[in-house]
Amino acid sequence: MKQSFLTLLMAYCCTVMACGKATNTPAPETGGETTKPVTKRRPASIGIVGDSSNVVKTTNGGMVLMGGGKDVDAAFKWMIDKSGGGDVVVLRASGTDAYNPYINGLGNVNSVETLLINTKELANNDTVAYIIRNAEMVFIAGGDQSDYMNNWKGTKTEQALNYLMNEKKAPVGGTSAGCAILGGFYYSGETGGLTSAQALANPYDVNVTLYNNDFLKAPYLQNVITDQHYLTRAREGRSVVFLGRINNDWKTAAKCIATDERTAVCIDKNGKAQVFGDYAEARPYSYAYFISADAAKQPEQMVANKKVIWSNNEKALAVYEIPASVNGGGSFNVANFKANEATGGKWYWWWVADGVLNKKDQ
């Protein structure tokens, strides 16, 4: 009797334990595994919207030089139109993927992806170079142009960008620091910022850091230096010094294309430039400037620790000012900088007397 009771008790306990264990074991969902597969993020990518698979579209080359501040919608639409609606890649060395939804909302594109390339290793990554080469449009964000110079120069990223601009003929643009590196001559800012007052007082100030055609090879811009935030930060004087230094150091009569904030110079495949801008009633359109140095008009004084003198009878530099427009203001031939082909703007003479920039109508 006692043995039968023990046998029944053990059977009961086993049943209870088995039921408890079964209750804690989740039943698999229909179809097997419940864990979603992890998608491996591509090197340098910090976000993508749209279709991540590559598409091939016919592109129409062009360059955008944007002056910083508020982005110019019309300039991005201009680029999107030339991209054929393909894949857009945003390049930067710091910041977020905020451009992805913004650009995606401005037109019909296959995808917008942001690559944050902040090391030489990433800039030399084959997948990163592949993504850039297969883009139909590339935009370089603002930041610090010395980061781009230090991390991208001499790498596969540089090669990919030069391929896009010169062989694939895809639209490429940049704003602020991203615009600064698009000229053949460029100011790096690697030692710190530079004001017009500093540069005009001493054109060989330690912060006047200039480079000559050792990085990007944008069409029509090899003899050009760019400047940005132009009127907002009163940078006219420093761009004059840039041209004077290029003349002194490399014996070249270079040009400058300078854009104010909320302003973009859009250059088509033939070198024809128009100026697009952002407008608000309390904040009218701004301007872009096309500045020409003349080899026959040498600076009278462009030496270290002395104020700049560059007068040439108050006609040292010929400057064409074009007001921006949502539909593209004026026209300027960047391929040759010929005065008789410029329309929709106004010509000035600029000169420097004892470290002070002066301007007058032509």
Image: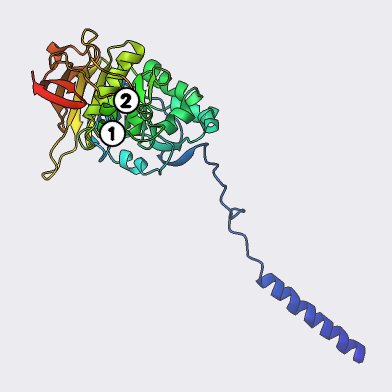
Q: Is residue 221 visible?
A: no
Left or right: 358, with 86 as reference point: left
Residue at 63 percent across and 65 percent down: it is 26
Left or right: 172, with 233 as reference point: right
- Label 2 is placed on what type of residue? Asn
Picture coordinates of residue 359, whole percent (x, y)? 12, 24
Say the numbered circle drawn on residue 195.
Answer: 1
Quarter of the image holding residue 303? top left
In the image, residue 13 above or below residue 101: below
Disc 1 or disc 2, which is closer to the eye? 2
CA–CA distance between discs 1 and 2?
15 Å
- Label 1 is placed on what type of residue? Thr
Q: Which residue is mark 2?
A: 305
Q: Residue furthest left?
A: 361
Q: Earlier in the sequence, mark 1 or mark 2?
A: 1
Q: Is residue 207 visible?
A: yes
Mark 1 Cα-neighbour bin, 10 Å: few <14, some 14–19, many ≥20: some
Q: Nearer the viewer, residue 135 or 175?
A: 175
Which secondary structure lies at badge 1? loop
Q: Residue furthest front?
A: 306
Residue at 14 percent across and 36 percent down: it is 285
